[in-house]
Image: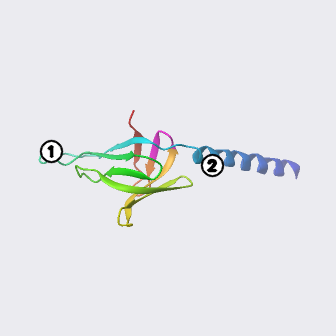
Amino acid sequence: MRSILSLFLIGFSISCLHDIDIQNTEINGTFVHKITDCDNSANPEESCTEYVWFNDNSTANIMIGGIDYGTRVTYKLINNRIDFYYTNGIKAELSFEIKNEMTLIRIEDNEIWNKEL
């Protein structure tokens, strides 16, 4: 019985350490994603790269879906999830799970976004 309790406590401690790491992760800078099979040769204004620029702890600019300009948004960081909102309060179709300080996973399509160095 003690060994089962010990294993439970060790597993719980490890999972809590993971949560603490995510909670203390600072998200800043620019994250990018290359759109798969994108061909903008017919329209060079269409962007084949998507961006999120984190400005501070509540605002960002996003450039998604091939548009060639950034849109100002606010964001909320809850646990390891980031949700974005347009200035009119409508939730953007963009949210991330934080993998680490260098990698975000887009929830809508499971695509990996990497921090630009």
Pick the quarter of the image with the C terminus: top left
Tell me the colour scheme of the image: rainbow
Task: Judge the density around disc 2: few (<14), some (14-19), many (≥20) Cα neighbours within 10 Å.
Answer: some
What's the amino acid at mark 1? Pro
User: In the depicted view, which residue is nearer to us: 109 or 86?
Assistant: 86
> Does residue 111 appear to the left or right of 11 in the view shown?
left
Foreground: 9 or 77?
77
Is 103 magenta? The answer is yes
User: Which residue is at 19% across, 45% downward?
Assistant: 39
Residue at image position (44%, 56%) is 75
Residue 52 shown left or right of residue 37 in the figure: right
Mark 1 and mark 2: Cα distance apart in space:
43 Å
In the displayed structure, does residue 105 sit left or right of residue 32? right
Tag 2: residue type? Answer: Asp
Residue 99 percent location from the top left of the image: 51, 45
Q: Position of residue 22 (x, y in %)?
A: 58, 46
Q: Residue 44, which numbered label? A: 1
What kind of element bears circle 2?
Answer: helix
Which residue reaches farthest right?
2
Q: Residue 29 or 51: which is nearer the viewer?
A: 29
Q: Foreground residue, 95 or 111? A: 95
Numbered badge on residue 98: none
The structure residue drawn at horizontal position 28% and vertical position 54%, both measured from the top left corner, is 65
N-terminal-most mark, 1 or 2: 2
Q: Is residue 11 left or right of residue 55?
A: right
> Where is residue 82 shown, x and y percent of the image?
47, 54
Which residue matches tag 2? 19
Above or below, 72 relative to 91:
above
Mainly helix, strand or loop, the magenta region? strand
Image vertical order of residue 89 relative to residue 4, above or below: below
Q: Which residues lie in the magenta part?
A: 100-104
Q: Pointer 1: residues within 10 angstroms few (<14), some, or many (20+)?
A: few
